[in-house]
Amino acid sequence: MLALSPDPKPTRHPAVQAFAPGRVNLIGEHTDYNGGLALPFALRAGVRVEARASSEEEIVARALDLGEDDRFPLRAIEPADGWRAFVRGAVAELRRSGVPIRGATLAISGDLPRGGGLSSSAALTVALCLALIELAGARRPGALALARICSRVEHAWAGAMTGLLDQLASLCGRERHVLLIDFAALELEQVPLKLAGHRLVVLDSGERHAHGASGYNERRRECARACELLGVRTLREVTPERAERLPEPLRRRVRHVLSENERVRQAAAALRAGDMSALGALLDASHASLRDDYEVSTSALEAAVERLRKSGALGARLIGGGFGGAVIGLLPPGVVAPAGALEVAPGPGAHASRLA
Ligand code: GLA
């Protein structure tokens, strides 16, 4: 009989998991890249990434919900489309910022509609970055530094010149709170979300968007042009009177940004005072401004807003960049939400941990 030596221990590579939530922006749209104000919160739904180290010098990624794969070598990362752009971008931008990324397999899953206005792409990028940082055993950068890395992924790899709203909401969310973000001072304040029995619901317009391809970048260019003409660094420095002298459509674009900042201030005050009808009216006014001055609404978004109002919402508006996606409504107690509407409440921010 042969003496069998005991099985060599299988080499267990370290493994981690990360979760990053999507976000809803209560109010303050297209203000982030204009040094303005916004009032988002993190959702309970989001993107989960499980990462396991491998001995190969490559990344193998699986999008479990789509049944799709990606594989690329660490030494030469080529651009790609769709969800793969975010994986490749996250790896490349983390390496560029000094995180020692090693070979790994990544399993990605989630429960957010993609391109549905709930910030699925930022949730994906934040979850990927947290998982890769944790796997590398590197120190996690502060929320702002990490949000900036994630936004470089959007800019350089997905071609969407988005601001920091989604990433900061995903990273800094807290249960039962909305985040008041001042993008000029880069200050964050947690404001309790007390709705006096009212509920917030989101309704999908059914229309998908990708900011790289929508009018989003064009709006951003228009704001940059307005700053140039007015000789300011951001629109935060502009008074409504000065904006009136701009040529169209820049005059209306800037009018939206300035009036939206004011509505964010008033919405935070309405929340603190428990004044739900004031909050509802501000949501309606924000939507009208996004539709008429910023021109980012579509007939599908209008129909979704209308459905919420008809069902008895105190106010409703499109959320996110527009050109498709979702709308939010504030429902008083006892009002039945329209079919397909999803109740939303603030959940905790993104997190990562080692797996056994
Ligand atoms: C998208 C972008 C954000 C922000 C919103 C509009 O969600 O990713 O940076 O600009 O649109 O408020």
Image (spheres, grey):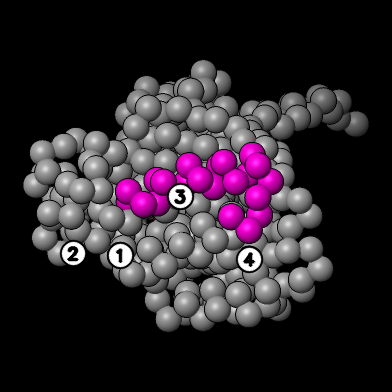
Q: Which circle's residue, 4 or 1, is located before the other in the chain? A: 1
Tell me the crowding category of disc 2: few under 14, some 14 to 19, or many 20 or more residues within 10 angstroms, Cα based.
few
Residue 115, placed above or below residue 336: above
**Bounds of the magenta segment:** 257-278
Instruction: Kindly check if marks 3 and 4 are in contact, taking CB atoms under 8 A apart as contact.
Output: no
Q: Which residue is mark 4?
A: 314
Q: Which residue type carries mark 3?
A: Arg
> Mark 2 or mark 3, which is nearer to you?
3
Q: Which residue type carries mark 4?
A: Leu
Q: Which residue type carries mark 1?
A: Asp
Dot 2: element: loop
Q: Which residue is mark 1?
A: 293
Residue 353, placed above or below residue 229: above
Instruction: Kindly check if marks 2 and 1 are in contact, taking CB atoms under 8 A apart as contact.
Output: no
Dot 4: element: loop
- Which disc number belongs to residue 249? 2
Residue 112 position within the rendered picture, expressed as x and y whole percent measured from the top left? 60, 59
Name the foreground residue: 269 vs 201.
Answer: 269
Which SS type dominates the magenta stretch?
A: helix
Q: Quadrant of the C terminus?
A: top right
Quarter residue 247 falls in: bottom left
Q: Which circle's residue, 2 or 1, is located before the other in the chain? A: 2
Residue 168 position within the rendered picture, expressed as x and y whole percent measured from the top left? 49, 37
Residue 192 position within the rendered picture, expressed as x and y whole percent measured from the top left? 67, 37
Q: Which circle's residue, 2 or 3, is located before the other in the chain? A: 2
